[in-house]
Image (cartoon, helix red, strand yellow):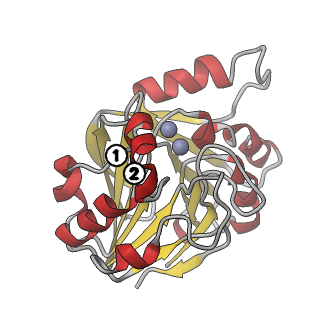
Amino acid sequence: MRVEFLGTGGFHPNEKRQTACIMLPEIGLVFDAGTSTFRVAQHIQTESLDLFLTHAHLDHICGLTYLITLPLTGRIKNLRLHGRTEILDAVREHLFADMVFPVAPPFEFHELKDTGELTLPSGDRIEWMKLTHHPGGSTAFKLHLKNHVFAYVTDTTVDHSYKDFVHEADTLVHECYFPDSKKTWADRTGHTHSTPLANLAKDANVGRLIAVHIDPLDESDDPIGIKGMQTIFPNITVAEDGLSLDLI
Ligand SMILES: [Zn+2]
Ligand SMILES: [Zn+2]
């Protein structure tokens, strides 16, 4: 089972990273729909897509408009959009307002409660919980594959309210917008910085940590100070667009 990191930046695209979208093509699963969502078309392997939104900020939803061509051209039969009710309401009322994007979306909207779980068409189970430390809140997801637990957490400051939720995940994909030197900005904007994330990965005993949602203003090779993080938790990768990993 592969996971494709289509977009690994936060806020706005830069020359190195588009904004959030992660796809597991073999089971037709997509997390978030940022500017990198145009890349979904290259990876389709299923008749239907199930897309789960963490929240409704533009860097996570603007690509929904790009996906409209897939059902309209017959590339996929069904596009199911899952999100908490207030997220889907924001998408319907604002992103798909007549004056913003005047094409009726051929999506099935599936509203999620604040916490819950469901079984995907593939038979795999997905769980979620609402997070409260980002403006408007976000949603953490955990996918139970046959031999692998995959968790995706973005747009939040690190706290221990979701430590149990990600406990012993084989792969934790987590935002790390800022290095420790920008802690003030992280706290002000409801985002993560390096050391608390490394501590979370260690305390939750995850298998490996993949950092995403990187600050688009920093295009250097080491935007979050990985060596310092690795003194706390060694198995860290800072994702770039195009990263493709096996979940085994
Ligand atoms: Zn974001
Ligand atoms: Zn956000």
Residue 119 position in % (x across, y down): 34, 55
Image quarter of residue 83: top left
Residue 214 position in % (x across, y down): 56, 57
Quadrant of image for the C terminus = bottom left
Above or below — where is 178 with respect to 109?
Answer: below
Q: Mark 1 sits on what residue?
A: 157
- Badge 2 marks a residue whose secondary structure is loop
Observer-nearest residue: 168 or 187? 187
Q: If you read the primary sequence from the N terminus, does the residue marked by circle 1 or circle 2 appear first?
A: 1
Image quarter of residue 5: bottom right
Name the side, left or right, on which 161 lies relative to 48.
left
Above or below — where is 226 with respect to 197?
Answer: below
Observer-nearest residue: 9 or 151? 9
Name the side, left or right, on which 100 lies relative to 151.
right
Residue shown at 80% from the left, 44% from the top: 69
Residue shown at 48% from the left, 76% from the top: 237
- Badge 1 marks a residue whose secondary structure is loop
Residue shown at 28% from the left, 48% from the top: 117
Q: Mark 2 sits on what residue?
A: 192
Name the side, left or right, on which 33 lies relative to 237.
right
User: How much space separates mark 1 and mark 2, taking CA atoms?
Assistant: 5 Å
Q: Amino acid at mark 1?
A: Thr
